[in-house]
Amino acid sequence: MALLAACRVGLEALGHQVRTAETGQGGLAEAAVHAPDVIVLDLGLPDLDGLDVCTRIRTWTDRPIIILSADSSEDRKVEALDNGADDYMTKPFGMRELDARLRVALRHHASGADADHLTEFTVGPLTLDLVHYEATYHGRPLDLTPKEFDVLAYLARHVGKVCTRRMILENVWGPAYANEQHYLKVYAYRIRKKLHDEAGEFLQNDPSVGYRLTVPAPSAG
């Protein structure tokens, strides 16, 4: 429980209000009763599989969940994201990094709170009109196929978050296409070419995990 104590002390020192639980069952109870703004979940729990806890929490809340784990394998990371996690940190880590991840998760959650009700998304230079299926990039019309539009619209709903390939395929093409990863590779290539983003600075690829749209940081000065 040394990590739990260290996280509590460190995060409180950085200005966060923290509630803790030593077990999966305790964490589920705390999350249900107190509805925290963001949940930090260690997969190494004494009583339950951490991914099961993540899945159960996700059934009643869309609050951000940041996973902590000693397992740095890509399969474990993909599994956690597919089960509803918003971010994944590998131990050991610094408290300032955890604080930064918390702030990013909270910011993305706030910006996406009404995403399901929006008819237009603007992510950096990209604007998507969901009603008319029209897109502009840097103010100029962007010629997209319906599926290319749908891929960008899904990523825009989750801007800044890595969406696994399975998540994108299931939501854009349907559950039957969950394992058809070559579809996504082809479409990502086509979209980047149309965006003149061959380097993947806007439509980013997290190797072996998935894709995300990232808003460019404002230039200094």
Image (cartoon, grey):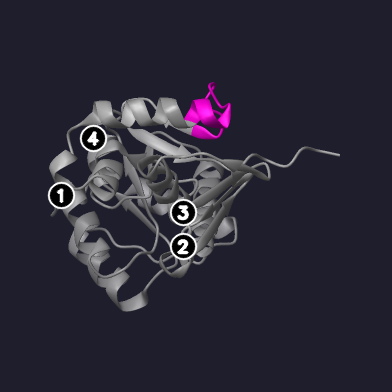
Q: Quadrant of the C terminus?
A: top right
Number of numbered callouts drawn: 4
The residue labelled by disc 4 is 76
Read off the magenta span: 192-203
Q: Nearer the viewer, mark 4 or mark 2?
A: 2
Residue 106 picture location, percent across and down: 51, 59
Tell me the distance, in whole angstroms, between the alpha carbons under discs 3 and 1: 42 Å
On residue 131, which mark appears? Answer: 2
> What amino acid is found at the position of numbered circle 1 in the picture?
Asp
Residue 190 picture location, percent across and down: 43, 27
> What amino acid is found at the position of numbered circle 3 in the picture?
Tyr
Report helix, strand or loop for mark 4: helix
**For residue 5, side relative to residue 42 (left or right):** right
Q: Nearer the viewer, mark 4 or mark 1?
A: 4
Residue 45 picture location, percent across and down: 20, 50
Whether residue 194 is in magenta: the answer is yes
Whether residue 33 is in magenta: the answer is no
Chain-order first, disc 4 or disc 3: 4
Q: Nearer the viewer, residue 101 or 114?
A: 114
Tell me the distance, in whole angstroms, between the alpha carbons under discs 1 and 2: 42 Å
